[in-house]
Image: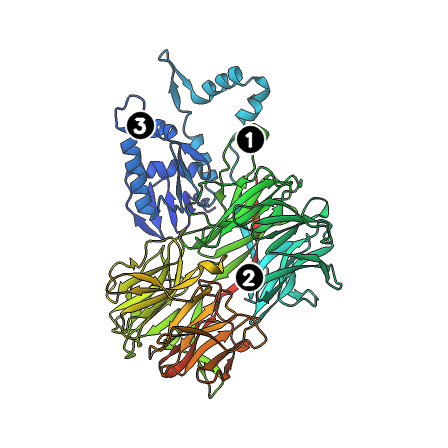
Amino acid sequence: MPAPAEKSRAVRFGLFEINLQESELRKSGIRIKLQDQPFQILTMLLERAGETVTREELRRRLWPADTFVDFDHNLNSGIKKLREALGDDSENPRFIETLHRRGYRFIAPVDVPRAVFAERTEQTPPEPVATASGRSVVRWQKWLATAVITVGAASVGYWLRSPLPPPRIVGSQELTNDGLLKDSLVTDGNRIYFTESLPGNSKIAQVSVNGGEIAAVDSAISNPVLQDVSPSRSELLVARYTWSLDGFNRTMWSIPLPTGAPRRLGEVSGLCAAWGPGGKLVFAKGRDLYIAEHDGSNPRKFAIAPDTATGLGFSPDGARFRFTVRNQINLTSEIWEAQADGSDMHPVFPGWNNPPAECCGHWIADGKYYVFQSTRQGTTNLWIVQERSVLRKKAPLEPIPLTIGPLQLSSPLPSTDRKKLFAIGTHERAELVRFDAKSDEFVPYLGGISASDVNFTRNGQWITYVSLPDLTLWRSKPDGTARLQLTSLPMKAALPYWSPDGQQIAFSGMTPGKPWKLFLISKDGVTPQAVTGEEITETDPTWSPDGKTLAFGRYNVLDPDKTFIELFNVETRQISELPGSRGIFAPRWSPNGRYIAAASHNGDKLMLYDVKNGNWRQLGNTLQSGYGYFTWSRDSAYVYFDVTWSGGNGYFRLRISDARLEKLADLKKIRRFPDQFDWTWSGLGPNDTPLFVRDFITQEIYALDLQLP
């Protein structure tokens, strides 16, 4: 009879595994050098993954009471060495989270560690604890005595419970397989409903909770965005995305299930909506929160959020709701909570992730847990937090991760039976393409690199571009040689433009929690230098032909009067406002230096500034949509741009002399990659070749098996 297989001693997390018997740490099978003390710290953190391990507990484990050491220095040094071995960052941790003045917590999912550690515990006698009289008692005996005396017999059962294993994902299943972009999941228990996007439009779709074929939900609503399902599971709440001269707007509609004609819900409109207690309709317009009857009648404002509110959702008992607060200047998002009447409004995880990047939360069906998504170091994962019990009303909520890359998972939605989490998994990929007028096709350009925001030097010898999906800035020769990375994460880059002499690049850059800012960097990659010191949104740099002046847009998404064009004198570093540019941004200087083309605040007007005469005039018509990125032809005779939200949905050029409009390409034929500003980039290569970024993002819905204590 063959010998039984030896029990595995490997504990895995991410690309790492440790072998307790051999005291080894490996990454992708390669041994990582780690001293004994950091290894013991790692072992103790893994033993209690997801839980707080206090500094005092680490001291007792690593340094006996009769050992004289500089405890703080040695522990800090051990943690630092451990983080270096794991490639972890204390500011944006993936593995070890620091709990100020308390201890540490291992936050990454661990592959079934507890059975291994349980065996280890069985072989290790309880740790003795020194008493005041010098005698030793087993730690749990002393704890029991203290608990009985101070808490009382009624609470002993609660305090003596063994720590429960943290919630975790134990399996997964891919439910869809069409690769199209998806958003806004809701479920009635049997089916998952979601928004699915195609080039130029979107639809409401559905799939079984067990997977299978995707089917469209029959509705006559154009550009729908799913919001919620009614408490009775008999109707969907859907927003219709429209564009007007006042900007984007969403009207709210009800769609009966399984089929039926959509019905407008009164005059309700806003960014988001949900059905609350008793079927009431709650919706947000900017910062203002409103409540109305189920059919949208009798709306009234009942609360004001600290900033733009999205993603409304109520607790299962209807007593409170949570929502995402988005700062559209700093591009942060934070989950807040309030009572159902709007009182006691406060952040749910204050100071937990700096800057905050959380959203899209839902309660588990019984209300004991809450799941949400959080983005750190450019990767989005799912997290879960146990709600406070009666005995822990004042305790801070301590989220633990459920997933950790490389697949980005978002929009978590608990199943009605508490056993699964539905989520959207995203693989990001893109391809630079050019439009070939002869074949009427989009073909790979520059080898089809995964890049956007491409700009050439005047002589065509160099290019700069933004790499996708990481959004770092690069420069190279057009054939890919002499390639050099100019920026690195966490900074994200956008809209780079070469100076006329080809020696430096102006671009917009953004670091987490800060607005987009204008930077200059040399072609050899010296540290980027900010043009201004203000914390305001600055985008769309453009050079005067002589290279002496840099124009850029100062943009305030909420206030047109705080949106205008500024001029930066490269030699004196003085900044001035371009006359008459209030409510106008996104400048593009013509190659001959005579004009600056720009957009109105809402993007519905194309404006032209005559540099010599100092006059503004509108070019072409006002759109019921928005103009996309502007690019001048090399002879300064045309302005090229795309329109993606109107019926035209094409790439156009407008002749300056007589405003003659010509459509060059139908953009319904290409699925385009969403850029840093939730738009789609377009530009021109040498010989005025139209350039675009083809979207190869694939998104599927996954069912994750959720194991709760």
**Residue at 32% in and 24% down:** 64
Would you name the residue on which mark 2 appears? 700
Eyeballing the image, is 161 above or below 674?
Answer: above
Q: Which mark is residue 393?
A: 1
- Quarter of the figure with residue 519: bottom left
Residue at the far top: name it. 133
Q: Residue 394: give x, y in percent of width and height.
A: 52, 30
**SS at mark 3?**
loop
Q: Earlier in the sequence, mark 1 or mark 2?
A: 1
Neighbour class for label 1 at 10 Å: few (<14), some, many (≥20)? Answer: few
Measure the C-alpha gap from mark 1 to mark 2. 38 Å
Q: Residue 648: give x, y in percent of width and height.
A: 56, 77
Q: Is residue 401 among what the camera can see?
A: yes
Q: Residue 697: give x, y in percent of width and height.
A: 49, 66
Q: Amino acid at mark 2?
A: Glu
Q: Which mark is residue 63?
A: 3
**SS at mark 1?**
loop
Q: Nearer the viewer, residue 245 or 350?
A: 245
Measure the C-alpha gap from mark 2 to mark 3. 50 Å
Residue at the far right: name it. 260
